[in-house]
Image: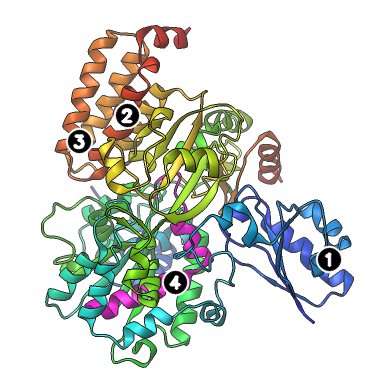
Amino acid sequence: MSVTIYIPGDSGSLSLGAEKVAKAVETEIAARGIDAKIVRNGSRGLYWLEPMVEVATEAGRVAYGPVSAKDVASLFDAGLASGGQHKLSLGDPEKLPFIAKQTRLTFARCGITDPISLEDYEAHGGLVGLRKAVAMAPADIVKQVTESGLRGRGGAGFPTGIKWKTVLDTPGEQKYIVCNADEGDSATFADRMIMEGDPFVLIEGMAIAGLATHATKGYVYIRSEYPHAIVAMEKAVKVARRAGVLGKSVLGSSQGFDIEIRSGAGAYVCGEETSLLNSLEGKRGVVRAKPPLPAIQGLFGKPTVINNVISLASVPIVMDKGAQYYKDFGMGRSRGTIPIQIAGNVKHGGLFEVAFGLTLGEIVDEIGGGTATGRPVKAVQVGGPLGAYFPRALFDTPFDYEEFAKRDGLIGHAGITVFDDSADMLKQARFAMEFCAIESCGKCTPCRIGSTRGVETLDKLKQNIEPEKQLALVTDLCNTMKFGSLCALGGFTPYPVMSAINHFPEDFRPAAVAQAAE
Amino acid sequence: MVMQPASTELAQRTAAVISELKSLEGPLIPILHGVQEEFGYVPQETLPIIAEALNLSRAEVHGVFTFYHDFRHHPAGRHVLKVCQAEACQSMGSDAIAAQIKQKFGIGFHETSKDGAVTLEPIYCLGLCACAPAAMLDGEVIGRLDADKIDEIAEEIRS
């Protein structure tokens, strides 16, 4: 009987040597005359165990990791092909605590299936949502998405169904579905994992959005820093076209829908939806003033749904299992699940999908296992470069849009960067301003000039030049940026800066600054 | 200002890229990517050709070309090493890693070594934040960078 061996091909695993492992496995299979097939799956998201090799046995899948190329021969000696014991054995991957504790709805197939096999996708519950949507009236699809409570996973948390309703209700010959895959926030990689590990779920979500709003054309705008995701999506779109999922008729329905993959060009600000639309149109990626909303005048001035990858990839499960099923997960106004990305200086870094409501402390200490360096956790930045730094004292904050807002933070795209006690928060605050200066589109003054002045002011503070005055100045500047900027780049840069100042004042005190300078 | 007449060969290669992509909606950025792929950078002389083909002003094309970090004004080295400098990598010592790399090749960010072997660039996030610090060499991703991996990179660049 032929054996199937799974070796992740996502860029995270590749960065840890998965390609060499795959080559070594191929060599061993040939040399030993084993009847085996290699599948390059996505990652399950346990990056401290990647590359994690799995074998499908009669008793289920058996995992090994982290595997390096030099382990491969000994793995085969130990009987890898039949799930034999080895020092890298992890047993049944589903029973690993990091996986067992999750609720995988959006990521149900990621790391399990062959990303470019539509048969595998369907065998694991794929296309059920789209088939149901094909048989429904657009308004009913929109209603179901609205009732699920799904909110934009890109960071803003705007209800997805309401966006769709606006597009449905706006008349237009041509409408568009635009997928924002410009995942530029540090600590986030959920979009990348879905596109590389289960691209059909995104395609299915976009097709449903098309049916729901009468949009016939979709674009996936993927950042150029993700070349592997671009290749994976292009392959999957071709497969979906051949199978009639995309094209002139979606699964035999009267409506057509097709998708085109576009590459960004290295501008962080293009993750902001209106900049992204300008970029797709072939313009400078500057922010547009709203109104008009993109839902009314979006891409090329046409009604446009613009959603994040995870928002769209969560739609198939909502259509498949129903609004109530999805809504039953979560807390408060944050319904469903959220793929939390645990990153940076952390022992167990990776992707953890779970219902809203876990506390930050549970995520960092219990699931993440503390720092990789073994030193105490000093701060965690939640929500990427525009998110606040949280100290240990706020680790009781539940993972929920509103609860984080109450504490002057944001969950953003749900990335968490852990820092140990060697972190210098003045340096981090300065970086936030510097990053804003590098990436500002230049349209509004608070962001364009404020960020540069912020760097200068924090540099003066570092040099101990009238420190109290600099602190007052930077606080005032942050206030101006927060309320005067056009978009979240300038508007949210104050979050990391002010949270660093407020929660870690010792790093900004003249004495500490003077000592650090010595 | 009088533009140097573009060489016929350059004009032909640019026109080939344009004709392949012109029918897309909003074709300018795909065309700039295509031109960069063709020449290794975006030669100034291609901008008026693109502008004319898309019925845009040269200023518009110049504005788009200079807005995006990806588009090169000069040819890069034979290898391009992008080192992540964003927060998740910072938390794992990317500053020190970048310093080691700069010392190793004797160049700073946005510079190309004298022998033309390597161009060094900062990058803000490769999505390898649970495998930090990370880098990308000619499109190949490298996670958990350390001194040994920097040596391997150097070997590949010099070979």
Where does the image place residue A302, in percent across and percent down from the top left?
Answer: 17, 70
Residue B147 location (% of width, % of height): 68, 34
**Residue drawn at x 14%, y 51% as measured from the top left:** A289
Residue positioned 14% across, 67% down in the render? A296
For the residues beneath circles 1 and 2, the answer to whether they share a chain is yes
Chain of the residue displaying label 3 = A
Q: Secondary structure at mark 4?
A: helix
C-alpha distance separating marks 4 and 1: 34 Å
On whether residue A166 falls in the magenta region, the answer is no
Q: Chain of mark 2?
A: A
Badge 2 element: helix
Give the CA separation, mark 1 to mark 2. Answer: 53 Å
The residue shown at (37%, 57%) is A264
| Residue on which the image places disc 3 | A482
Which residue carries the number 2 mark? A499
Report the magenta residues as a range.
A184-213
- Badge 3, how many Cα within 10 Å: few under 14, some, many 20+? many
Distance from Cα at disc 3 to Cα at disc 2: 13 Å
